[in-house]
Structure formats: structure tokens, C-alpha cells
Amino acid sequence: MAENIGKISINLSNDIDLQRALKNAGVSDDTPVTELAVTGTFNYIHFSDIFDKMNKSLRELDLRAAFYDAYYIKKYEFSLFRNEKRYNQLEVSYTDCDTLVSISFPESVTQLRPDLFNRFSNLTSIIVPDDHPAYSSENGVLFSKDKLTLFRYPAGCKGKYVIPDTVTKIGGHAFNACTGLQSVILPPSVVTIGKLAFYDCAALQSFVISDSVIEIGNSAFSGCKGLTSIIIPPSVETIGDYSFKGCTGLQSIVVPLSVKKVGDTAFARCTGLKSLKIINPAVKLGKGAFYNCTALTTLDMPKSVKYKQNNVFEGCTKLPLYNELVEENKIKAIKQTKIQQLKKTNAYEWVDTLMKNSAYPYKIIRQANKLQLLVFINDRHKLVIPVSFKDFQSVIPKLMDAIQRFETAINEFGTIYIDNMINDRKGWTIHHLPTARQNELELK
């Protein structure tokens, strides 16, 4: 295998692909490149190809001297995307690049996918020019131009990080998969913690949510297995779906009076959680909000909080109320079975009584959730009608009138006219029988 070479510079354009540019720079295909500087014009294909080819060696990528053509579309894609700005957000297709430690973007890259940096697990520095129109960087951390939003903290940085006091929003994926991050200090300016903001920060041990935070986004702390305690301040109104799912180190949670909604599976699979206190008597608990919190033994919650409909505590086997829920569910299941059986019996009897009083030969077939009524209009035409157990009482009174109208239509106009009638009645079908004898066989 060829030895790694130092920094090289290549010139790209929409007419020059990566392979040709490397050849022009005197670099062979099998040469591992560690530092790459790009000039000229690059597009989304170039960007993805760089990581497809160099994902095992590239440490530094400098794009600051190049122009990003966000409007570039391959010829065969032109008819699909026209002249829309389809590729204004850079992305890496399917390749992780664990060797990359530094990446620099030009002013022409004005939109970056929030999850782009998830593929660079050892990245320690993200750099943009000082006069960039959309972003700014400080100590390798990417912010919005006005520094109100922390856009991305490099995943390779470790230890403790103090967020600047200009920041009001932690963006989506901002600290996603920062596996070496142990502690984060939030300033009192932060209002929103975005979705997946601290997702899978497995080493994160302590986190204090400032009193200014109103919303904790979906999956914000999901998978933070090292997190042992979290204090939700009385400013928070919404705890998003999956927000603390799988935080197995959490032992105690207090949901304050300010919280109006706890999202679906927000604390699901927090298997170390032992104590839970919910203060707001009107809080809405999402589906499976505390699903499978198997160590939960202590629950302090107002009686008015509704939890039975959404299986909020399903799998919390150590809770005293768990056995009550199990028994209630058993009783409900038995009742539902009886009701279903009664509906089946009643539906059959109703349909059978109706048809006995008619002149039509018929047959009733029982199915899982409905009856199938076969009505022989004449020697050559069979009408198949589904009758649901759920709404049979509203259907049956109109059934005979509909059957008679079908007979009239067939006798006077033939089967061509009834196509529209069939389309108007969901599930109804008309069958053309080759012989009158078939009627007799089906009725047996």
C-alpha cells in the first residue's frame, strides 16, 4: 500500500470529477491523502466522493478557496429536478469518516444539514470564514451568524463545554453522538433544546437545564446512558417524544408544575429509574411515556392525571398500580370479547331474519370481523355483500332496498348499468354464474 502523503491541492469544476482532479495533481488512485485543499468549483457529488474515496485517511479538508455550486444537477437528473436548488445542503451519502479532525467551508455553502457531522466521530474543528453570511465558528464550534443558535459541536471533542451566553437555542443534532462529552453548562439565555441535540452522548454524566428553557425537543437526550441525574426546571412546558428514552442511569425524576405535556415514550426504557414525581394535575402524558421503567417503585402523582388510556406505565412491573392495570386490562379484554361475540350473533340473526322474509335464495358466511352475504338475484347473477359487525345495525335496514334496486337494474339494463352502483357501495361485488346449477351447489 502507498504511503500517506501530506497536504495536496486539487482544482475541481462541474466538468472535472474527483478522480481526474487527483490525476491532474499527480496523485494516483491508491494514494492515501491526509490533507486536502480544494480550489475551483465543487458540487454535491464531489463532496460525497471525497469521503467515499478518502474515508480511511483524510484528516483535514479545506474548502475555503473553492466555490460551491448548489444549483448543479447531473444531466440525467435534469428532467427530475429542473432548475430547483435541490442540492443546497451538503451531505455524505453512506460513508463514515473516523479520521477527519478538521473541516473548513467557504462562504458559498449557506446551508448545512444538521446531521451531516454525525459521520465524523473524531472531528474537533469546524471552520468558516469570518465574513460568512450564515455561520460563524469559535474554537472549532459552529454557530449561526448571530451566535444565537449553537449549530454543531464537533463529535471528537471531549470533557466539559461551557455554552456561550449569546446562545438561545441548542440546534437539532448539535451534540449528537459526542461520545466523549462529559459535562455541559447551559447559560440562562437558552430557551430551546432541539431534537436529537444530545442524542447518544453516552459519557454525559451531569446536565443542568437552565431556568430559561421552555422546550426539550424530541429525542434530545435519548441514549445518554451515563446521565445519572437531570433537573427539569419550572420553566419547561414541553418534554418531547423520546426525549430521555434509554437513559438507563437516571434514578429520579420530578416533572414540575409548568410541564403541560410529556411526549410519547419520553422516559421509556429508563431501567434505572426508581422514583417519579409529577406535579401538574392536568399534565398530558403521551403513549408509553414511562414504558418499561422496570425499577420504578415510587410514584407521586395527582389522582386527576390520566394514564390508563395511553399505557403510560406499561411494563413498570414494580409499581403498585401495575397489577391494578393488568387486572383492568384483563376485564376490558373479556368485555370486548363478549361484546364482539354478541355482535357476531346479533348480526347473523338480523341478516338471517331479513333474508328469510325475502324471496331471494341466500347464504351467510361467518368471517373474522364481518359476515359475507351471498344473494342470488337470479339464475345467473350472485351479489356478494360484506356486513360489518361494527355497524351492521345501521346497514341492515337499507339492505333489502339496495338488493331490490340491483335486481331491477340487472333485469332491465343488464350488468353494464350496475358498475356505477357497485362502485358506490364499498366491498360489494357482482358475480356472473355460468349455469343455474352453480346456484344450487353454493347454497348447500
Image (cartoon, rainbow, N blue to C red):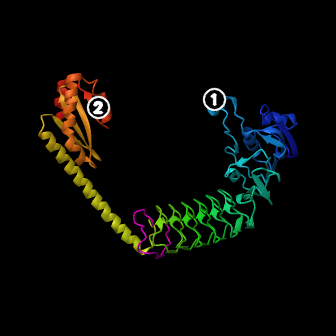
Give the label on residue 421, or none.
2
Total labels drawn: 2
Q: Three-letter amino acid code at disc 2?
A: Met
- Residue 209: x and y in percent read 64, 70
Q: Three-letter amino acid code at disc 1?
A: Ser
Q: Decide whether the magenta segment is chiefly helix, strand or loop.
A: loop
Identify the residue at horizontal 71%, vertical 52% (top origin): 117
Query: Is residue 125 visible in this depiction of the protein?
Result: no
Query: Would you say residue 302 sits in the magenta stretch?
Result: yes
Query: Is residue 120 visible in this depiction of the protein?
Result: yes
**360 left or right of 9 in image:** left
Could you classify mark 2 by the number of other residues whose Cα lies within 10 Å: few (under 14), some (14-19), or many (20 or more)? some
**242 left or right of 29 in image:** left
If you read the primary sequence from the N terminus, does the residue marked by circle 2 or circle 1 appear first? 1
Could you classify mark 1 by the number of other residues whose Cα lies within 10 Å: few (under 14), some (14-19), or many (20 or more)? few
Residue receiving disc 1: 79
Q: In the picture, residue 196 is in which quadrant? A: bottom right
Give the label on residue 146, or none.
none
- Specify the quadrant that holds the N terminus: top right
Identify the residue at horizontal 47%, vertical 62% (top origin): 288
- Residue 5: x and y in percent read 87, 45
- Residue 399: x and y in percent read 21, 39
Instruction: Please state which of residues 105 and 92 is positioned toward the viewer in this rendering.
Output: 105
Query: Would you say residue 287 sits in the magenta stretch?
Result: no
Q: In the picture, residue 440 is in which quadrant? A: top left
Q: Is residue 166 above or below residue 403?
A: below
Write the start and end of the magenta stretch as one range. 292-312
Q: Is residue 292 above or below residue 400?
A: below
Helix or strand or loop: what does disc 2 sit on?
Answer: helix
